[in-house]
Image (tube, coloured by chain):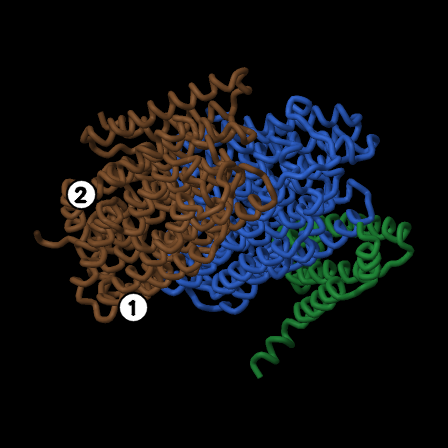
Chain colours: A brown, B blue, C green
Amino acid sequence: MEHCLLLPVFFPILAGVLLLLKRDFKERRSLLVYTGAVLVLGGAFAFFAVMVPADGVTLFYLTKEFPIFFELDTLGRFFSVTVTLVWVLAGFFSFEYMKHEKNEKRYYGVYLIVFGVLLGLDFAGNLITLYLFYELMTLTSLPLVLHTQSREAVMAGLRYLFFSFAGAYMALFGIYFICHFGTTLRFTAGGVIPAGALAEHKTLFLVVAFLMIMGFGVKAGMFPLHAWLPAAHPVAPGPASAALSGVIVKGGVLAVIRVVYQMIGVDFLRGTWVQTVWMTLALITVFMGSMLAFGEPALKKRLAYSTVSQLSYILFGLSVMQGEAVTGALLHVAAHAFIKVALFLCAAAIIYRTGCTRVDELRGIGRGMPVTLWCYTIVSLGLIGIPPASGFVSKWLLASGSLASGIPVFSWLGPAVLLVSALLTAGYLLPVTMKGFFPGEGYDASRFTGKEPPLIMLVPLLVFAALTVLIGLLPNALTDSLYTYAVHLLTLEV
Amino acid sequence: MEIIRNFPCLSILLAMFSAIISSALKGAGARRLNTFVVTAVGVLSACTLYFTHVTGKSYVYVMGHFPAPLGNEIRFGTLEAGMALFFCVIMLFSLNGGREKIRLEIDPGKENLYYIMVDLLLSSLLALVYTNDLFTAYVFVEINTIAACGLIMIMESGRAIEAATRYMIMSLLGSGLFLIGLCMLYDMTGHLLMSNVQESVRQIAAEGSYMIPLLVTIALMVVGLAIKSALFPFHAWLPDAYGYSTVSSAAMLSSLVSKGYIFLLIKIIYRVIGFDIFVQSRIINVLFVFGLAGMIMGSTSAIRENDIRRMISYSSVAQIGYIYMGFGLGTTAGMVASVFHILAHAATKSLLFVSGVGLTDVADDNKQFIELTGAAYRNVCAGLAFTVGALSMVGIPLFSGFISKLLFSQAAVQSNLKMLPALIVLAISTVLNTIYFMKTVIRIYTPIKSGYPSVFAKDHPLYALTLLCFVALNIVLGMCSQPIADWITQGLSVFA
Amino acid sequence: MEIGTHLLANYAEVVAVALFGIGFTNLLLQKNMIKKIIGLNIMDTAVYLFLAEKGYIEGHIAPIVMNGNVSPDTYINPVPSGLVLTGIVVSVSVTALMLSLTIRLYRRYHTLDLDEITMRLKKEGL
């Protein structure tokens, strides 16, 4: 039974490789049928693996001490459900969108491979496996960034690669030490390093923890290593940038959680300079990302800056190391994934139908694409944190957790920064809605008439908008189980 | 099974006689003979490997009729046999990968000379791997140098001859030092056979007399071999020698010739000086520091380089630094990591050279970076293979480079004093590696409209097949590293 | 003092090592190819001197059996002599190779100065 863990990881990868190797399909239709079938099947396998409790499974031994090992815990389940939902729906969205891009076969092949790799990352049961799939994620998602092969895309891809590898090696440096001192490499709440070793090499482990947070934080766009994100995400084709910005960045978050909470242990880090610096950097990123987004005229780039900012909400929640804050952070992982994918898909739909990329070109777009713009508005409200959308719940938890943490200065500075950033978020997202629905007197919005995208693009948008509202309205089931897990991660007594 | 004991000697003789016969053959005949000999030696080595692996012992083969203290001996265990097999495999792949270039770049009348040199190289490598006699080792070091020099200058361009001259000068300096060290050791111990020398060295070390001469001797031999294997700061000859020779030569020089010397050094460390005495001497700290310096300096030179071949060559300097860093750690784990890196680097570097030539081919033989823009689209399989090689060098899991980095780091954390410098330099050097290899990969995948023609795999089946084999070798080293590491550990334990 | 007597007692080895140093420096530092090769030969010869000195035993004769006398007290140690012979063969072939390289370079560039050749190659941009 445990082998059902391997299926969702390797089925999409193999299917993707097969697709890349195959000759071109005669008809576009059969390509879509193939991709769609693989996505649906892969998604079904993933859900099956998530639902069925199974033991870990060792694939093979890299060296004697380092098995490639898969295991699902609550965190992995949570992440993989998010990934699967986003990936399948965004995949269906691209069936229409990719009509106007070249090299469709390559796109879908890579898209499927990344799907499997992401699930592998979520299913990873020890540090080495996590690192393996982390690197693979960087590599396999690179073709998505490079897809248009324009000069801009290549430069962005180069930057993406440099930053990711530099980050990964900072993390690898830490992995060397954890391998040596840790009792096991399997993820264990509270850490795996014996207290004696921690006490003996305190400074060393603080540096290691810091480097690993910074290193994996690169993927999550944490200041000062965030510069690749606003360059790389917008140049990809629409659905791909949605997937990159919504899901792949979460790989960094997952790795940070694994390392901080399940390898090194929060008790060791709490109250040290590492926590202080981490919180400071996260807050700087939150604020700076929002400011940059506020000043950015191109819609996709604006959304990418918004990702920088929102990801650091999550990182801030994690850095507080308090039950509610961690719950909020975890919830925000899903909330932000659905919202940001929906936003990018809206932007993609607009580009696909009208070719407009800049915000100021979108005056009056609500007349022609009302459904798209309504979805945009709903998820925007979610991102800003207005009830009843999901963002409200997660931000509320983050703020109250921070206040309850009792860390000097940061306990109130954090919520204050989050609040300011929320205002800025409203400032950069809502003008599109307002100008879109109310272009003003004497403005001719007729060029948008009848531009509503086809159903296959609208359905994913509607689903994500619905999910955003649904999580906001009925958060309790989810937050309760996440809170239990957060308590488990923090090794607190209930 | 007893007949297998003759195989090491047989393979040396086979390689040597094929060189002699080749001088009477035309180019094509010499080529076929060479392919046959390399394959045959590979098969013989595989049999030896199997035999020694099953018995788990090492054997002594007496050459001629004189027994131990005076006669000449061959000694082989699993490590030697495995190394010989590996060298044969890499040699075969490198030759096949560069076969078309050999035909194009070498004067047809001189093709058989090239294969004579290759045969000689093979025989000297085998002798270095197998011999148990120090003076025999010296003689074959010189033969190896001459053969390598021939491989460099076979193109007969001004650059190649100049590079060969410089290579020759540095090599002669190295072998001079090795020779005088060897003579001093003979003076002190009265023996030339490695095992007998070691007994005397142990006595000297136990008595505490002659400690300074012993130290000087070890230093001379180690420095001599370090010069020959291009350890930083003795690497000045390397980029020219690798950069301006034909591709098979460059691949063999970087992955076989320098590795042969390093293997001889390992033998000297274990079998002549004794690992513990070597560790006690301060020389390992020097090796450690130079290894670290090489890791950084080689990579920074590679970053500044604008010529793809020379860039790959400078990367060799960095990788050799890794190997010496492993020696410098002074633990068995460090040694295992170094030996593994010899394999990993040989497999990767020859892959990079061979695939690199596929990329320069579709840019009119222009090695400048700017001309390589988009080359991976014009020669798809070379582009893919180069990417695999680059990823392995950079240390992506599943490829061989990652495992050697992992082994080095595991070895480093065992040593309190050397842990931090080793790990920090390892991290820095990895980042530097990433910079220049990824720069190249991005460059070759940058789309551009260019007038250069495309090349397809089906027109060059041998080349494509070779690349495939190299990639497979890399992945095997990366994924099945545990049996290989076990084999190295076991081999080293029966080595002394 | 002690070191002085040691050096005096082993003057032949001292000379050999000094010669080795001279040869080594010449091979490394000389610009002229021919001088480099001469340095190489000095270096190798120094090693042979060292070996010959090591094998020589005061008052003994060359290891050629004469009059059926096989007593080890008669002859010098033959192994170093054998090594010297082997070494000479190696150094002759290496010297020949170096000379042939020099000839090729000279024919092409009409100079024996290696650095100048390198400069010219760089200027040609080859």
Q: Earlier in the sequence, mark 2 or mark 1?
A: 1
Mark 2 and mark 1: Cα distance apart in space: 34 Å
The residue that appears at 65% across and 22% down in the rendered structure is: B458
Q: Is residue A265 above or below residue A100?
A: below
> In the shown orientation, is residue A114 left or right of residue B163?
left
SS state under label 2: loop
The answer to whether residue B5 shows anywhere in this view is no
Q: Nearer the viewer, residue C26 or A199?
A: A199
**Residue B165 at x, y percent in the picture:** 77, 52
List the residue tagged with mark 2: A475
Picture quadrant where residue B387 is located: top right
Residue wearing tag 1 = A273
* Residue in the image at 27% along x and 59% along y: A319
Q: Residues within 10 Å of mark 2 (few under 14, many from 20)?
A: some
The residue most toward the front is A442
Foreground residue among A41 and B2: A41
